[in-house]
Image (tube, rainbow, N blue to C red):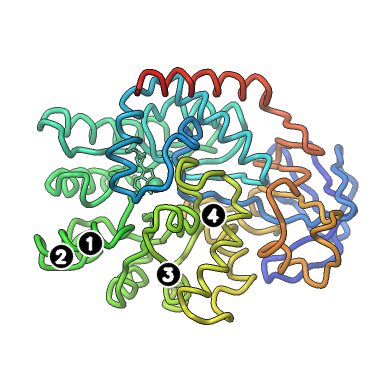
Amino acid sequence: MTTLEITGGRVLRPDFSVERADVLVDQDAGEILDVGDVPEGDETLDAADCLVMPGLVNAHTHAAMTLLRGYADDKPLDAWLQEDIWPAEAELTAADVRAGTELALVEMIRGGVTAFADMYFEEPAVADAVADAGVRARLGHGVVTVGKDDESARADNEESLDFAREYDGYADGRVKTVYAPHSLTTVDDALLAEFTAEARGAGVPLHFHANETAGEVEPIVESEGERPLAHADDLGMLTEDDFLAHGVHVDGEEIDLLAARGTAVVHCPASNMKLASGMAPVQRLREAGVTVALGTDGAASNNDLDVFDELRDAAMLGKLAAEDAAAVPAEAAVEMATAGGADALGFDSGRVEAGANADLAVVDFDAPHLTPVHDHVSHLAYAVRGSDVRHTVCDGRVLMEDRDLVTLDEAEIRGRAADRAADLAERAD
Ligand SMILES: CSC[C@H]1O[C@@H](n2cnc3c(O)ncnc32)[C@H](O)[C@@H]1O
Ligand SMILES: [Zn+2]
């Protein structure tokens, strides 16, 4: 057994207490062995002035959309997708997706993210990028059937399920998969029901967008005579293994339904603000017992993949939505970005505890904007930035040490991604 000792720092425990402790990791098993006064490890990571915390989870993104960062801004969701994003995405190649995903991985590992959920095109290229980078991910080929004939609509759904079957367990088990219909309004109902049933038979969970804008709720209520999540439930789309992105426009009955089914909601506050989609009722969701995770959404609607930004936005916007400064307190925001995300994605991570996956972020508190430290958890929610992360560890492997990436060639990736983004924009114009 090879061990890694993270030494000299403080540790954020699952109950949100912070104590002076070292962490010993079994690198072969990818698990935390011990926390506290631990035996010496074969290798060490220095954590002086640092806080060892669970790796952050970006529970909803479209990683390769880094190529479209800044390509189209200042529009609401529908116009943004239809006028700018979908025409550009029609030109994407697998090599583009690979480059964009690697750029996303550089950014996420730098920011202490150890797991993410992706819904996009050319997903085998995403899986390969994840395998090489060393992170953990829940991946799905995104399905859109609007504007497609019956044959290609069916083929798109089949591709999603085929990918899910083939890639589950890829990258030494770090990749898990989903069936990923884009949303209730962009995938045909009959196909949704059929392929959701097939996904259940194959033990594949679902990841989809839901109740993101007011404009998508009304047509469903009109055509189905019920709210979108009641309709999703009729289609069999809400189980405890599933997670949906956004959940902005949910009413009290939908919140109770989510709690009853155990379906998680991935809150994407920055994207919701930028596209002016609305404010998710995060405090009410959490009070009802719904698992809430955090996501950046794609880099084109955010415009970065810094989950610490999301943490702060979630706490701030949660207060505004509830009109209550006590809503979504610091601990809640940190919980959503760590244990909540791990829970939504089905990973045994999100806590610094013996037996859990060794997915860790080591945050350097030796910085002017983090001085003084009255309360570490307050700083995590309101003051820490992604660039404060000093080391990132996933599955027991060091992915970033002293802000140097170990598994990725940052300069090469940035150059390739910039070239591919320029070519893509030219093809799309
Ligand atoms: C079919 S792959 C995923 C699909 O989703 C698009 N997308 C990016 N951001 C959002 C969002 O906030 N709501 C809905 N859809 C979004 C992405 O561009 C891909 O086309
Ligand atoms: Zn999205």
Calculate the distance from the C-alpha at mark 2 to the C-alpha at mark 4: 32 Å
Residue found 80% across the figure and 60% down from its top = 370
Give coordinates of residue 164: x percent, y percent.
36, 36
Calculate the distance from the C-alpha at mark 1 to the C-alpha at mark 4: 28 Å
Name the residue that disc number 2 marks.
221
Q: Is the Cβ of the residue at disc 2 closer than 8 Å to that at disc 4?
A: no
* First in residue order: circle 4 vs circle 3: 3
Q: Is residue 31 left or right of residue 391?
A: left
Name the residue that disc number 1 marks.
217
Amino acid type of the residue that numbered disc 3 sits on in the rendered structure: Val
Question: What secondary structure is marked by label 3?
Answer: loop
Comparing labels 3 and 1, the label whose residue is closer to the camera: 1
Calculate the distance from the C-alpha at mark 4 to the C-alpha at mark 3: 14 Å
Calculate the distance from the C-alpha at mark 2 to the C-alpha at mark 3: 23 Å
Give coordinates of residue 272: x percent, y percent.
43, 57
Vertical placement of 371 versus 416: above or below?
below
Q: Quadrant of the C terminus?
A: top left
Calculate the distance from the C-alpha at mark 3 to the C-alpha at mark 1: 20 Å
Q: Is the Cβ of the residue at disc 2 closer than 8 Å to that at disc 1?
A: yes
Residue found 34% across the figure and 72% down from its top = 255
Question: What secondary structure is marked by label 1?
Answer: helix
On residue 290, the disc is 3
Question: What secondary structure is marked by label 2?
Answer: helix
Comparing labels 1 and 4, the label whose residue is closer to the camera: 1
Name the residue that disc number 4 marks.
342
Classify mark 4: residues with Cα within 10 Å, few (<14), some (14-19) or many (20+). many
